[in-house]
Image (cartoon, rainbow, N blue to C red):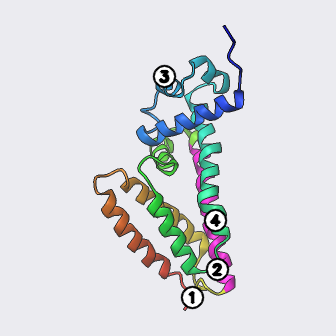
């Protein structure tokens, strides 16, 4: 019988991918390691080779997968925007793409579950939110300098509000009223962003 080739990078990525799907669908607390390895088609030994326990797996998912996702879907594209209309169009696309089981849903669920009970996990989650808030604040600061964001706007104040609002929309995607939440959210977000416009 031919021995299976070891592919540690592929195995680790697969574990993180499946864990993320579970965290996003069921939440961190309800996600079991047994279910994760079964879905991944691996053994617990393979999981424990890469992650000491569920907490280290959760932290790796937050620090690697979710942080990269926030950078790739939010922060880096925002760095390319040069107008309020561009920002509004960008946010419409992001809200339209949002689902009940995407990485953002997992991030929001994990923050709600673990943010106040596990200081290490809370710190990892906070780093991801800070990346996101920082990206939005930088965009607003750049917009003020370029003259398309109103000079009275305080980016450091607006950024946490913006991120919290998007997270709230993510929670709404889990409810039976998801379609209405998305429709109303798109209108509300458009209206909010308009208040940032330079007159």
How far apart are the two marked residues, 1 and 4, measured between alpha carbons? 22 Å
What's the residue at 54%, 28% (across, down)?
Answer: 40
How far apart are the two marked residues, 3 and 1, measured between alpha carbons? 54 Å
Residue at image mark 3: 34
Residue at image mark 1: 198
In the rendered image, the vertical position of residue 164 relative to residue 105, given as above or below: below
Using the rendered view, name the quadrant where residue 90 is placed: bottom right
How many marks can you see? 4
In this view, the residue farthest toward the bottom is: 199
Mark 1 is surrounded, within 10 Å at the Cα level, by few (under 14), some (14 to 19) or many (20 or more) other residues, namely: some
State yes or no: discs 1 and 4 in contact (Cβ < 8 Å): no
Q: Is residue 130 in view?
A: no
State yes or no: discs 1 and 2 in contact (Cβ < 8 Å): yes
What's the residue at 64%, 72% (across, down)?
Answer: 139
Residue at image mark 2: 143
In this view, the residue farthest toward the left is: 176
Q: Could you say where residue 105 lies in the image, as x and y percent from the top left?
A: 46, 49
Q: Secondary structure at mark 1?
A: loop
State yes or no: discs 3 and 2 in contact (Cβ < 8 Å): no
């Amino acid at each position: 019988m031919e021995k299976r080739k070891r592919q540690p990078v592929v195995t680790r990525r697969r574990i993180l991918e499946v864990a993320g799907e579970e965290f996003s669908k069921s939440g961190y607390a309800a996600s079991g390691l047994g279910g994760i390895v079964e879905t991944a088609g691996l053994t617990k030994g393979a999981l424990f080779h890469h992650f000491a326990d569920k907490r280290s797996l959760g932290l790796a998912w937050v620090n690697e997968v979710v942080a990269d996702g926030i950078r790739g879907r939010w922060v880096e594209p925002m760095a390319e925007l040069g107008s309020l209309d561009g920002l509004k169009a960008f946010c419409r696309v992001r809200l339209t793409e949002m689902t009940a089981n995407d990485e953002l849903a997992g991030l929001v669920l994990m923050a709600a579950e673990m943010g106040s009970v596990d200081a290490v996990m809370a710190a990892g989650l906070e780093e991801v939110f800070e990346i996101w808030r920082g990206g939005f604040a930088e965009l607003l600061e750049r917009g003020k300098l370029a003259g398309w964001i109103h000079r009275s706007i305080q980016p450091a104040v607006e950024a946490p509000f913006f991120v919290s609002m998007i997270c709230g929309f993510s929670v709404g995607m889990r409810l039976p009223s998801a379609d209405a939440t998305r429709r109303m959210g798109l209108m509300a977000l458009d209206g909010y962003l308009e208040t940032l416009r330079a007159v």
